[in-house]
Image (spheres, rainbow, N blue to C red):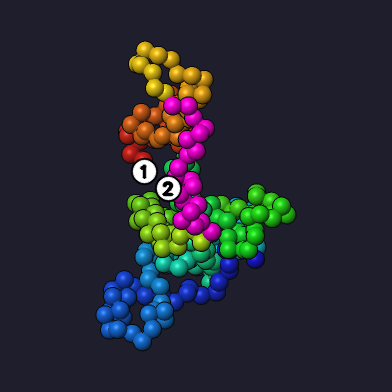
Amino acid sequence: MVSTTLISSVPQYVSAEEHRNIVGSTPTSFNDIPPVLRHKEDNVRVMLDPPLHTFTEQDCANGTLFVIENALVFMSSTGVGFQVPYPAITLHAIARPESGPSIYCQLDELAGEPGAAESPENDEASDMRELSIIPSNPASLELIFEAMSLCASLHPDPNVSDDDDLDEAFMDESAFETFTGNEGDELSEVGRAALQHLESIIDDPYHPGENGLNGAGEDVESEGDGGH
């Protein structure tokens, strides 16, 4: 079962103000409160690669984007739409290609499937879908991005435990040789390898490499471009 699912109506939601009023009235159950709509954008075009089954180019041509706390929803002007749960959105960013700015997303279509990541039968390319969100008003890109970031933060990866975070946060010091010499001494081969590794993973946005990439291997836009 893929994470991106077709829908015929927009899921129920409330505005932030309505949510405050409901919570303030002390409801019988907080679990019954609909999710909050964080942003709504009309006149949006989307592109899906590979395409979603039965969702046509005409369906993608124009619609409304709903950034709801439990799912990202696109409802086409044709009356059909799709929704994506946030755990399935492995990447979202503002892209500024020559064809025009958009919100670029990578979707894990097997997110939440037990053992999906370990299954050798699942081909990585077929499990991933690309989604581009292109609003008619480019100025709304920042608002959409910020709303998606907020909603994504409400859905941490359930497959990552605190122990996993600690394992990734610390390196095995036995893999490196400590440098205790004077300033004029040379690092050993292991020490030089350690230094090169640290330099490769440290992102210095103020001093991008000569190849136009920062420490994370990402494109760095010049300040004069006015990009994000």
Q: Where residue 161 sits: x, y (%)?
A: 49, 57
Q: Is residue 166 magenta?
A: yes
Q: Where residue 212 sits: x, y (%)?
A: 44, 29
Above or below residue 123? Residue 6 is below
Query: Circle 1 is placed at which residue position?
Result: 228
- Residue 155 falls in which quadrant of the image? bottom left
- Which span of residues is magenta-colored? 159-178
> What's the mark number on residue 171?
none
Q: Where residue 29 sits: x, y (%)?
A: 38, 83
Of 154 and 9, the residue lying toward us: 154
Marks 1 and 2 close (CB-CB < 8 Å): yes
Of 142 and 160, the residue lying toward us: 160
**Is residue 149 something one can see in this rendering?**
yes
Classify mark 1: helix, strand or loop: loop
Which quadrant, please, contains the C terminus?
Answer: top left
Of 127 and 119, the residue lying toward us: 119
Above or below residue 150? Residue 97 is above
Query: Circle 2 is placed at which residue position?
Result: 94
Above or below residue 119? Residue 37 is below
